[in-house]
Amino acid sequence: MKIRLYQENVSEIKNMWIDSIDHIQITSSSEAEDAMLFFYSKVLGLRQIPKPEAVKANRGTWYLLGEIQLHTSIEQNPSNETSRRHICFRVRNLNRLVRNINKVSKIW
């Protein structure tokens, strides 16, 4: 995937309508899973929260830090194009956000 940014259009989008971060999805290999879970739960002391029924069977753990969730999961040899790693933003108006992003970028 390639992204082209059109900097000349940035002045048109004063407010991107992002309110906060909802959650962050991080991944590790199965070999590093125990170390990852130890780090987030014991070293950082994050509070584990229940996963929804739809994803309960998947490996990994969910944590809460303030109002932001941290989701961990397992991926073997992910590439940037196929990885499930992501940040999920809370937005006021998704359609407006998409229009603003399309004004300044093209993804192909």
Image (spheres, rainbow, N blue to C red):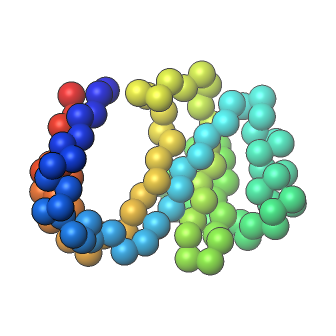
Residue 7 visible (yes or no): yes
Residue 47: x and y, percent? Answer: 73, 70
> Foreground: 89 or 37?
89
Q: Position of residue 16 (x, y in %)?
A: 26, 66
Relative height, residue 18 to residue 30 (above, below): below
**Total tally of numbered discs in the picture:** 0
The residue sitting at 65% across, 71% down in the picture is 65
Above or below residue 68? Residue 27 is above
Q: What residue lies at 21% left-to-right and 69% top-to-bottom?
A: 14
Judge by depth and name the residue closer to the eye, 13 or 22. 13
Q: Position of residue 15 (x, y in %)?
A: 24, 71
Q: At x 21% / y 47%, what residue is drawn? A: 7
Residue drawn at x 64%, y 69% as measured from the top left: 64
Does residue 49 appear to the left or right of 84 in the view shown?
right
Q: Quadrant of the N terminus?
A: top left
User: Could you tell whether 105 is left or right of 81 in the image?
Assistant: left
Instruction: Using the rendered image of the protein, determine whether residue 98 is visible from the camera's viewpoint.
Output: no
64 left or right, relative to 8:
right
